[in-house]
Structure formats: structure tokens, C-alpha cells
Image (spheres, grey):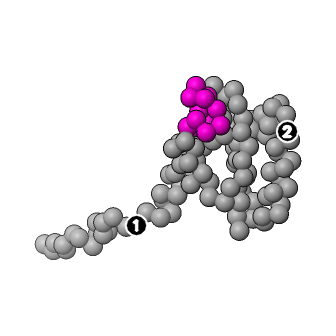
């Protein structure tokens, strides 16, 4: 079963929270619904800046324990190579999940055209 290790931060990048989950989009939605869960309203954790997908639950738990003990400079060293501008990765995840599960909205344009012969 897939597991995700993630780092989420606030808009000012003051706090870096490490987490472990099996459904990353559901977890991010929960953070959005519970903005003052870990910190006060001024420091809402709403920006996903790093995540790893791990296929084994045991390996994910070991990695989570390791990353949780990292100091802030060590966490920043992990984030910067993959996300140098610290952009919110949630937008890309939402887009990617929408592309995979999006049903066909309309039939092909070619099939609706009538053939015209002269």
C-alpha cells in the first residue's frame, strides 16, 4: 500500500510540519478544513512544499521517523532541490488527479460532423 511522507508549511514558511498518510489529497483537504489544528490562525499550514511516495508501509514509517528528527536546515536541504521556489504542490496534484479520473465530457468533434460531398 502506498504511503506519502510530506512537508507542509504556512505562507511565511515559518513552520515545517512533517506528516505521513495514505491519501495525500484527502489529508490536504483536511488541513484546509481544520486551519487551526496545529497552530493559531496566523500560521495556517496550507502549502505543500515536499512529498515522497513510498510503496512499503514499513519503509514509509522508517523514513517518516528519520525526516521527523531532521532540523530545519536539513528539511530545507531536502525541499530546495525539488521545489526551489517553495510553490504549493497541491495545485499540481489536484490537476493530475483530475486528468486521471476525468470522464469524457463530449463525443469527438469528428464523429458529429456530417460528411459533405460536392
Foreground label between 2 and 1 = 2
- Residue at the spot 23% in from the left edge and 70% down from the top edge: 112
Q: Quadrant of the C terminus?
A: bottom left
* Quadrant in the rendering for residue 84: top right
Magenta-colored stretch includes residue 42: yes
Residue at point 69%, 26% (across, down): 14
Image x and y of residue 7, in percent: 70, 42
| Mark 2 Cα shell of 10 Å, populated few (<14), some (14-19), many (≥20) | few
Q: Which residue is mark 2?
A: 70
Asked if marks 2 and 1 touch (Cβ < 8 Å), the reply is no
Q: Quadrant of residue 78?
A: top right
Q: Secondary structure at mark 1?
A: loop
Q: Quadrant of the N terminus?
A: bottom right
- How far across and how far down the image is residue 46, in percent? 58, 37
77 or 2, which is in the foreground? 2
Left or right, 68 with respect to 84, comes to: right
Of residues 1 and 81, the one drawn nearer to the viewer in this rendering: 1
Rendered position, 102 above or below 49? below
Q: Which residues are magenta?
A: 35-46
What is the distance, in whole Å, between disc 2 and disc 1 at their CAs? 42 Å
Residue located beneath label 1 in the image = 103
Amino acid at each position: 500500500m502506498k504511503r506519502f511522507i510530506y512537508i507542509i508549511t504556512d505562507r511565511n514558511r515559518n513552520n515545517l510540519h512533517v506528516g505521513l498518510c495514505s491519501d495525500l489529497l484527502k489529508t490536504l483537504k483536511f488541513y484546509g478544513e481544520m486551519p487551526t489544528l496545529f497552530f493559531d490562525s496566523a500560521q495556517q499550514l496550507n502549502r505543500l512544499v515536499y512529498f515522497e511516495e513510498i510503496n512499503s508501509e514499513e519503509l514509509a514509517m522508517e523514513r517518516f521517523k528519520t525526516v521527523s528528527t531532521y532540523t530545519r536546515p536539513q528539511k530545507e536541504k531536502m525541499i530546495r532541490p525539488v521545489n526551489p521556489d517553495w510553490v504549493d504542490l497541491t495545485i499540481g496534484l489536484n490537476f493530475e488527479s483530475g486528468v486521471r479520473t476525468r470522464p469524457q465530457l463530449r463525443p469527438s468533434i469528428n464523429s458529429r460532423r456530417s460528411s459533405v460531398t460536392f
